[in-house]
Every structure is written in structure tokens, then in C-alpha cells.
Amino acid sequence: MLEDENVEDENLTVQQEDSAEDVSSDSKNKESKFENFKTKFFNFVDKGVSASKKGLKKAGTAISETGTKSVHKVEIANLNSKFNDSCKKLGNVVYEKFKEGKTVSSSDSEISEIYGKLDSIKAEIAKHEEIIKSIGAEKSEPKDAE
């Protein structure tokens, strides 16, 4: 009978060890699954952050380009307004000279001064238009891969 008890004790001890190994194995398996999940999760988050950074960078560039173009377009509108005002002034000067019976010539100082302003304004408008075109051209050129 003592021998039966010893065998039972040994069997119980072996079962406990097997049970402990199963728990340990389950624990390691769960840890492995958790590590795998954690790795996949952080990779997913990293990809999301990277995509967000790229998207925000592109949006920032587009906003900047739009803002720059808008500034130049407003300047062109202001210059066109000045050009029209100068044209009106030129027309008034010519009208007054005709009304007084005077001859109108491009060598007249008042007329040549207005012509000079008109040429200067047209040159400024052309500069702003070129800047706007260059902003559009930069956008269409392929950029280095980042």
C-alpha cells in the first residue's frame, strides 16, 4: 500500500509538472502572439504616420504655392489698375492738348512721362506673370524620390 501511495505521489508530481509546462507553454505562446501583434500594430502606425507626414507636406506645399500665386495675382491686378489710371491720364492730357489746339507728340514731356510709366507697369506685370508660370512649372517637374 505504501508503494501505491508513492506511485500516486509520483504520478501527481508528474501531472503537476506537465500542467506547469502547459501553463508555461501557453504563456510563451501568448507572449509570442502579443509580440507579433505589437510589431504589426507599430508597423501599421508607423506607415500611417509616414503617410500623414507626406500628405501634410504635399498639402503645405500646395498651400504655399497657392498663396504665392495669389500674392502675385493681386499685384498684377493692382498694376493693371495703375496702368488703366495712367491710360486715362494720357487720354485726358491728349484731350486737353487737342482742345487747346496744340499738337500732340511723343516728344512732349508730359506725354513721354506717362508712356514711361505705362512701359514700366507693363514690365512689372510681365515679371509677376513669369513668376506665376515658374511656380506652375516647378510643380509639373518630377521631384527626386524621398
Image: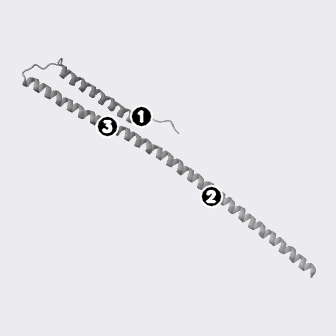
Q: Return the mark for residue 138.
A: 1
Taking the image as shown, residue 129 lies to the left or right of residue 54, namely: left
Q: Quadrant of the N terminus?
A: bottom right
Sequence-wise, the earlier of marks 2 and 1 is 2
Measuring 15% from the left and 18% from the top, which residue is drawn there? 105
Q: Position of residue 38 (x, y in %)?
A: 62, 57
Within 10 Å of disc 2 (Cα), the crowding (few <14, some 14-19, many 20+) is few
The nearer-to-camera label among 3 and 1 is 3
Within 10 Å of disc 1 (Cα), the crowding (few <14, some 14-19, many 20+) is few
Within 10 Å of disc 3 (Cα), the crowding (few <14, some 14-19, many 20+) is some
Where disc 3 sits, the SS reads helix
Measuring 87% from the left and 73% from the top, which residue is drawn there? 10
Q: Return the mark for residue 94.
A: none
Q: What amino acid type is highlighted by mark number 2?
A: Phe
Taking the image as shown, residue 111 lies to the left or right of residue 35, namely: left
Q: What amino acid type is highlighted by mark number 1?
A: Glu
Measuring 68% from the left and 59% from the top, which residue is drawn there? 32
Disc 3 from disc 2: Cα separation: 53 Å
Marks 3 and 1: CB-CB under 8 Å? no
Q: Position of residue 92 (x, y in %)?
A: 13, 28
Q: Mark 3 sits on what residue?
A: 73
Q: In the image as oriented, which residue stretches furthest toward the top?
A: 107
Where disc 1 sits, the SS reads helix
Disc 3 from disc 1: Cα separation: 18 Å
Taking the image as shown, residue 82 lies to the left or right of residue 138, namely: left
The nearer-to-camera label among 3 and 2 is 3
Numbered-mark total: 3
Q: Mark 2 sits on what residue?
A: 37
Splitting the image into 4 quarters, where does residue 133 fall?
Answer: top left
Q: Position of residue 126 (x, y in %)?
A: 30, 29
Q: Position of residue 69 (x, y in %)?
A: 35, 38
